Amino acid sequence: MADSAVRHLLEIVLKFKNDPTGIEKADQNLKQFLNNLQAVGKQMVAVGAAITAALGLMTKAATNYASQLDATSKRTGLAVDELAKLGYAAEMEHANLQKLEMSFRYFTRTINQAKNGTGQAADEFARLGIQIRNQEVSYGLWATCGWKRCAPCRIWATAQRLQQPQ
């Protein structure tokens, strides 16, 4: 490549050896070309920096989300992969992981009240034929409770719809 550039330069010099204005024009054109090339190089550096910054932000966001999933998993006892699925479903229902965790707490308290025969949920669960026998609550219960306002039920139903083939 360097040989080709030298050859072209020699051709230009020989072509304009008797015409000094031609060499000056060629020199100006070459300088303008190099300036343009330098400007393109600066733009490429700026683009590279922007891409690097974007990748850094995406990595930070992914790390933060993974940390949030891990912490929520430890507090709720749910597996991280299940939380990730439910978190995505929560976003489809215009919620987020914090709201999902709050819903789990509320729902757990409601189930405990129903188990003890107290609270508004006890009557509703009895009407639906749902009996709470121990602390273990299956996800299937959430999908069948029938409460339209119950966030865990809406989120679980959304997660089930998302897993079904289109």
Image (spheres, helix red, strand yellow):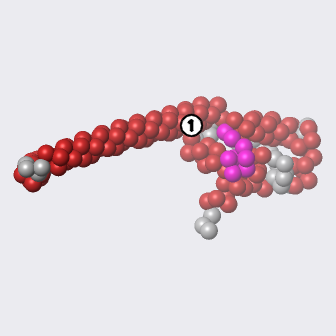
Q: Which residue occupies 56% across, 37% down?
A: 65
| Residue 158 placement (x, y as % from top left) | 70, 55
| Residue closer to the observer: 15 or 141 | 15
When the figure is inspected, residue 112 is found, relative to residue 125, above or below; the finding is: above
**Is residue 95 rendered magenta in the image?**
yes
Res. 137 in view: no
Count neighbours of disc 1 (C-alpha within 10 A) and say few if under 14, some if 14 to 19, many if 20 or more: some
Mark 1 residue type = Tyr
| Residue 52 placement (x, y as % from top left) | 41, 37
Q: Secondary structure beneath disc 1?
A: helix
Q: Which residue occupies 73% across, 47% down?
A: 94
Residue 10 in the figure: left or right of residue 86: left
Q: Quadrant of the C terminus?
A: bottom right
When the figure is inspected, residue 61 is found, relative to residue 89, above or below; the finding is: above
Res. 92 in view: yes
Residue at the extreme bottom: 166
Q: Which residue occupies 7% across, 49% down?
A: 17
| Residue 49 placement (x, y as % from top left) | 40, 36
**Is residue 153 rendered magenta in the image?**
no
Q: Which residue is mark 1?
A: 65
Residue range corresponding to the magenta coloring:
90-97
Q: Quadrant of residue 114?
A: top right
